Amino acid sequence: MMRVAIIGGGAAGLMAAATIHEDDPSVEIFLIERNDGLGKKVIISGGGRCNVTTGIRDVKALLAKYPRGNKFLTSAMYAFPPEAVEAWFESRGVPLKTQADLRVFPVSDDGRDIVRAFDELFAMSNVRVLLKTSATRVEKRGDEFFIFTKESTEPLVVDKLVLTTGGQAYRHTGSTGDGYAFATALGHTITALAPSLNAFFTSETWPKEISGLSFERATITAMRDGRPKFSGPFLFTHKGVSGPAVFALSSLVAFEPYDAANPLEISIDLFPDLTVDDLRAQIEAVAATNANKRFDNVLGLLVPKSLADVVVDQLGISKTKSANQVAKKDMARSAGWLKAIPLHVVQRGAGDEFVTAGGVTLSEVDPATMESRVCPGLYFAGEILDVDGFTGGFNLQASWAVGRLVGKSIGH
Ligand SMILES: Cc1cc2nc3c(=O)[nH]c(=O)nc-3n(C[C@H](O)[C@H](O)[C@H](O)COP(=O)(O)OP(=O)(O)OC[C@H]3O[C@@H](n4cnc5c(N)ncnc54)[C@H](O)[C@@H]3O)c2cc1C
């Protein structure tokens, strides 16, 4: 009987274990997890609601959501695309819903239901779930893998090993990056690692005055090297800026150095659907119809008042001036500022990032099977690989798809 060990009971490990079991119930599977329950990060994902996958149906469009690893993911994603992921969970008693923004959640809005589907499957299977078990070291001797744990003096000996230890974001969930050392010990190389999907801290302190103010759609542009722009939900925080548009940009600059001495210049457009001339004309029009009101209050008819206060402060427009006393030039400057708010990013919101960019070097792994090219019998899935996506269910989708492919490769 084949014996398989999977280190890491997160999204990828769960799907790998479930798939091996479904394909060949005779395989003896050891699922090693240091926590006292499975899928801790899955449960807290999406703010506890678990954005389990995406409503995007075109796999090419889906692959474009991965700044790293998109080509590598091709086989896995075609084999287990979002609709197959949805069908898998729904057939196991977890109904899902797709939001207007194409994020997919359990109807219950409870990530625990996603993990419960696996718990129930494993309870009736050959999957031996070893909770509160921390792998400390792995070795290959001949054709066998030896897994040493903190809890036992005897190593676990298996024919195949799957590393699904995740990245090193939100380390308190158990994902502390141990797998990088295991992969290295078995002959793999690890790329540079960096936080991704993080907020930005800015040198400007005024964002804290409007902390929490959010916009359904803003466009954020990094001014270095004419980087692409991102549009999406956006908000100001007490230390800078955050939200999906910021996360997407953070992902593209994950490996760029920036700090107080060498900040990343960004520009925020709060009116991406208007030209600067249209916005200027709107400001002039409200100013004309409210000629005797204070200009900050007039601007407050177009944007939240707290933001209007920031605009006049930043542009040095007198607060006591009424709209008819403010020069057209200052109205144009207000429009220009709202269309291109200049900010300097000095720090990643480290510790708060959602994923780790970088990981096991992809050229060392066969994308058709997810088996190691340097250590036969070793497989990888999930965030441990040099694969990461934007927010919107893409990181879990990659973990399910690659975990599935590992399971299929071993199960057959
Ligand atoms: C706050 C937050 C919210 C997120 N929300 C979403 C979302 O809504 N949608 C989305 O697609 N993605 C989301 N992500 C990203 C997504 O959760 C991860 O990319 C995904 O969980 C990675 O799956 P994984 O199986 O590779 O690793 P993980 O889920 O991190 O699982 C790895 C497991 O391995 C275990 N482990 C590690 N080392 C050892 C060891 N030595 N011995 C034993 N066990 C070990 C850990 O305890 C852990 O349970 C979010 C991430 C965070 C931090």
Image: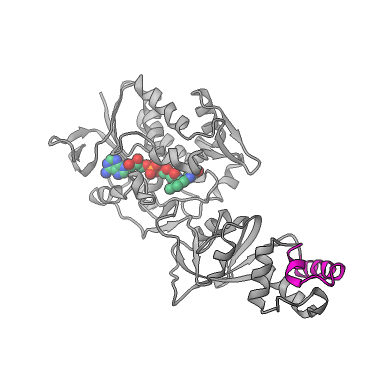
Q: Nearer the viewer, residue 135 or 260?
A: 260
Residue situated furthest left in the rendering:
153
Residue situated furthest right in the rendering:
289
Q: Residue 271: where, in percent of width, then height?
A: 71, 62
Residue 238 seen from this side: yes
Quarter-of-image position of residue 408 = top left
Q: Nearer the viewer, residue 345 or 196?
A: 345
Q: What main secondary structure does the magenta stretch of the protein show?
A: helix
Quarter-of-image position of residue 218 = bottom right
User: Dividing the image into 4 quarters, which one contains the C terminus?
Assistant: top left
Q: Is residue 178 left or right of residue 260?
A: left
Tell how many labels.
0
Q: Residue 110: where, in percent of width, then height?
A: 50, 34
| Above or below, comparing residue 396 to residue 305 in the picture | above
Residue 288 magenta-drawn? yes
Residue 381 seen from this side: no
Q: Quadrant of ligand 1?
A: top left
Q: Residue 343: where, in percent of width, then height?
A: 56, 71
